[in-house]
Image (spheres, rainbow, N blue to C red):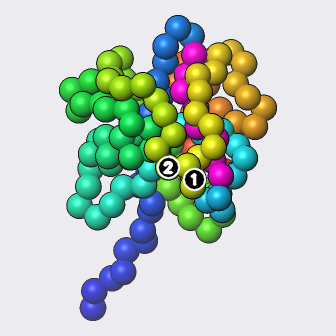
Amino acid sequence: MKKNRYKIVPSSYLVLIKNGKTLLARRCNTGFEDGNYGLVSGHGEKDETFTDSLIREVFEESGIKVRKSDVKVAHVMHRKGGSDERVDVFFVAKKWSGKPKIMEPEKCDDIDWFDLNHLPKNTIDYIKFAIRNIRKGVFYSEYGW
C-alpha cells in the first residue's frame, strides 16, 4: 500500500541589502499579512528549485533580475503558520539588475528601501526574525511552533 507523505510548502525570499537598507514590499489584497511589509518572495511550483522559484518570483513581483550565480542561501527557516508548515529559504544577492518597482499592483501597494536597524513596525514578524538571524550569521531557525 502506497503511503501518502506529508507536504510542506516551499518558499523563496530575496534579501537585498544596499547602503544599510533592505528592500521590502507592502502586501495588499492577498488575504495574508495585508498592510504589512515583507521581502520579495514566492512559492515554488512543481518541479521548480528554490533558486529557480526565487529568480522567477523576484522578476514577476519587482522587475529585478538576479542570476543563479549571484545569489547565495543565507538562512533556512522551518515555519509553522496556521495549518501549514513551510520551508522558507532566504537568499542574499550582491548583484542584480533593474530598479525595484511594483509589478503586481493588485498584490503590492508599496516597495521601498528601509534601514536594517529600523524596519517598519508593520514588518511581518517572521521576516524580522529571519533578517535578524541573517545579520547574526544564524543559518537555520524554527518559527511558530
Look at the image and tell me in which quarter the N terminus lies: bottom left
Q: Is residue 121 left or right of residue 38?
A: right
Residue 20 shows in this picture: yes
Please determine whether, in this image, residue 10 is positioned above or below residue 134. Answer: below
Spot occupied by residue 87 in the image (x, y as percentages of width and height): 46, 51
- The label on residue 107 is 1
Amino acid bearing label 1: Lys
Please determine whether, in this image, residue 31 is positioned above or below residue 5. Answer: above
Q: Cβ–Cβ below 8 Å for labels 2 and 1?
A: yes
Q: Secondary structure at mark 2?
A: loop
Spot occupied by residue 95 in the image (x, y as percentages of width and height): 32, 18
> According to the image, label 2 marks what residue?
104
Q: Residue at x 30, y 30 (%)?
A: 66
Label 2, label 1: how far apart the Cα atoms are = 6 Å
Q: Nearer the viewer, residue 35 or 68?
A: 35
- Identify the residue at the far right of this view: 121
Spot occupied by residue 129 in the image (x, y as percentages of width and height): 64, 33
Q: Nearer the viewer, residue 76 or 62?
A: 62
Q: Main secondary structure of the magenta part?
A: strand
Residue 72 shows in this picture: no
For the residue carrying disc 2, how many other residues have a C-alpha within 10 Å: few (<14), some (14-19), or many (20+)?
few
Q: Residue at x 63, y 43 (%)?
A: 109
- Identify the residue at the far bottom of this view: 1
22 is within the stretch colored magenta: yes
Magenta segment = 21-28
105 is within the stretch colored magenta: no
For the residue carrying disc 1, how many other residues have a C-alpha within 10 Å: few (<14), some (14-19), or many (20+)?
some
Splitting the image into 4 quarters, where does residue 133 fall?
Answer: top right
Spot occupied by residue 131 in the image (x, y as percentages of width and height): 58, 28
- Identify the residue at the far top of this view: 19
Q: Is residue 44 left or right of residue 118?
A: left
Q: Secondary structure at mark 1?
A: loop
